[in-house]
Amino acid sequence: MNPRIIAVEPLPDFKLSLTFTNQERKIFDVSAYLNIGVFTELANPALFNQVRAFNGSIIWPNELDLDPDTLYLDSHPVSFSSSSVKTAG
Protein backbone atom coordinates (compact mmCIF):
# COMPACT_ATOMS: atom_id res chain seq x y z
CA MET A 1 0.00 0.00 0.00
CA ASN A 2 1.27 3.45 -0.89
CA PRO A 3 1.51 6.22 1.72
CA ARG A 4 -1.65 8.18 2.43
CA ILE A 5 -2.18 11.93 2.50
CA ILE A 6 -2.05 13.82 5.78
CA ALA A 7 -2.05 17.40 4.41
CA VAL A 8 -2.96 19.19 1.20
CA GLU A 9 -2.50 22.77 0.03
CA PRO A 10 -3.94 24.19 -3.20
CA LEU A 11 -1.40 25.91 -5.43
CA PRO A 12 -1.73 28.11 -8.53
CA ASP A 13 -2.45 26.50 -11.91
CA PHE A 14 -4.62 23.74 -10.40
CA LYS A 15 -1.77 22.00 -8.62
CA LEU A 16 -1.82 20.50 -5.14
CA SER A 17 0.98 20.27 -2.60
CA LEU A 18 0.57 16.93 -0.85
CA THR A 19 2.19 15.64 2.33
CA PHE A 20 2.10 11.87 2.81
CA THR A 21 2.27 9.65 5.88
CA ASN A 22 5.92 8.86 5.10
CA GLN A 23 6.63 12.64 5.24
CA GLU A 24 7.23 12.90 1.48
CA ARG A 25 6.02 16.11 -0.12
CA LYS A 26 4.84 15.95 -3.71
CA ILE A 27 3.03 18.10 -6.27
CA PHE A 28 0.01 16.75 -8.14
CA ASP A 29 -1.30 18.52 -11.25
CA VAL A 30 -5.09 18.34 -11.39
CA SER A 31 -5.35 20.27 -14.69
CA ALA A 32 -5.41 17.06 -16.77
CA TYR A 33 -8.68 16.11 -15.03
CA LEU A 34 -10.50 19.42 -15.52
CA ASN A 35 -12.10 18.34 -18.82
CA ILE A 36 -13.33 14.98 -17.52
CA GLY A 37 -16.92 14.50 -16.32
CA VAL A 38 -17.64 15.71 -12.80
CA PHE A 39 -14.09 17.02 -12.42
CA THR A 40 -14.97 19.96 -14.70
CA GLU A 41 -16.45 21.58 -11.57
CA LEU A 42 -12.92 21.92 -10.19
CA ALA A 43 -12.07 24.44 -12.94
CA ASN A 44 -13.75 26.95 -10.60
CA PRO A 45 -10.81 28.23 -8.50
CA ALA A 46 -13.10 29.01 -5.55
CA LEU A 47 -14.13 25.34 -5.37
CA PHE A 48 -10.69 23.96 -6.21
CA ASN A 49 -9.13 25.91 -3.33
CA GLN A 50 -11.49 24.29 -0.80
CA VAL A 51 -9.71 20.92 -1.04
CA ARG A 52 -8.88 19.20 2.25
CA ALA A 53 -7.26 16.01 3.46
CA PHE A 54 -9.78 13.33 4.43
CA ASN A 55 -9.30 9.66 5.39
CA GLY A 56 -5.89 9.37 3.76
CA SER A 57 -6.90 11.08 0.54
CA ILE A 58 -8.34 14.46 -0.48
CA ILE A 59 -11.88 15.69 -0.94
CA TRP A 60 -13.70 18.82 -2.09
CA PRO A 61 -16.99 20.16 -0.65
CA ASN A 62 -18.98 18.67 -3.56
CA GLU A 63 -17.64 15.22 -2.45
CA LEU A 64 -15.27 14.87 -5.40
CA ASP A 65 -12.16 12.96 -4.49
CA LEU A 66 -9.14 11.32 -6.07
CA ASP A 67 -7.67 7.91 -5.35
CA PRO A 68 -4.74 8.19 -2.91
CA ASP A 69 -2.67 5.71 -4.95
CA THR A 70 -3.14 7.86 -8.07
CA LEU A 71 -2.14 10.94 -6.10
CA TYR A 72 1.02 9.26 -4.83
CA LEU A 73 2.10 7.55 -8.04
CA ASP A 74 1.31 10.41 -10.44
CA SER A 75 2.70 13.28 -8.37
CA HIS A 76 6.19 14.74 -8.53
CA PRO A 77 8.59 15.02 -5.57
CA VAL A 78 9.26 18.49 -4.22
CA SER A 79 12.86 19.67 -4.18
CA PHE A 80 13.91 22.64 -2.13
CA SER A 81 16.16 25.49 -3.14
CA SER A 82 17.08 28.61 -1.26
CA SER A 83 14.71 30.78 -3.29
CA SER A 84 11.68 28.59 -4.01
CA VAL A 85 10.06 25.20 -3.99
CA LYS A 86 10.36 23.31 -7.26
CA THR A 87 9.09 19.99 -8.49
CA ALA A 88 11.56 17.37 -9.54
CA GLY A 89 10.89 15.42 -12.65
Image (tube, rainbow, N blue to C red):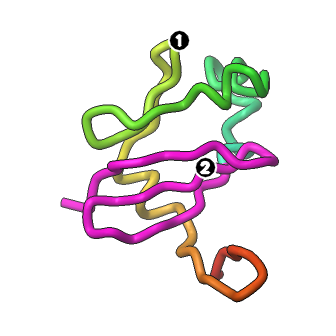
Residue at 43 percent of width and 52 percent of height: 70
Q: Which of 77/70 is in front?
A: 77
Q: Could you say where residue 48 lies in the image, as x and y percent from the top left?
A: 67, 29
- Residue 24 lies within the magenta run: yes
Residue at 74 percent of width and 43 percent of height: 14
In the current view of this chain or complex, which residue is farthest to the front?
Answer: 82
Q: Which mark is residue 16?
A: 2
- Residue 88 lies within the magenta run: no
Which numbered disc, 2 or 1, marks the residue that appears first in the sequence? 2
Query: For the residue marked with disc 2, what is the amino acid?
Result: Leu
Question: In the figure, is residue 31 to the left or right of 71?
Answer: right
Q: The C terminus lies in which quarter of the figure?
A: bottom right
Question: In the figure, is residue 77 to the left or right of 69?
Answer: right
Q: Which of 49/88 is in front?
A: 49
Secondary-structure class at tag 2: strand
The magenta stretch is 1-29
CA distance for labels 2 and 1: 17 Å
Query: For the residue marked with disc 1, what is the amino acid?
Result: Asn
Q: Is residue 29 above or below residue 74?
A: above
The prevailing secondary structure element of the residues shown in magenta is strand
Q: Could you say where residue 30 lies in the image, as x and y percent from the top left?
A: 66, 44
Q: Could you say where residue 29 lies in the image, as x and y percent from the top left?
A: 66, 53
Q: Which mark is residue 62?
A: 1
Q: Could you say where residue 28 lies in the image, as x and y percent from the top left?
A: 59, 55
In the current view of this chain or complex, which residue is farthest to the top?
Answer: 62
Quadrant of residue 56 in the image? top left
Q: Is residue 11 above or below residue 53?
A: below
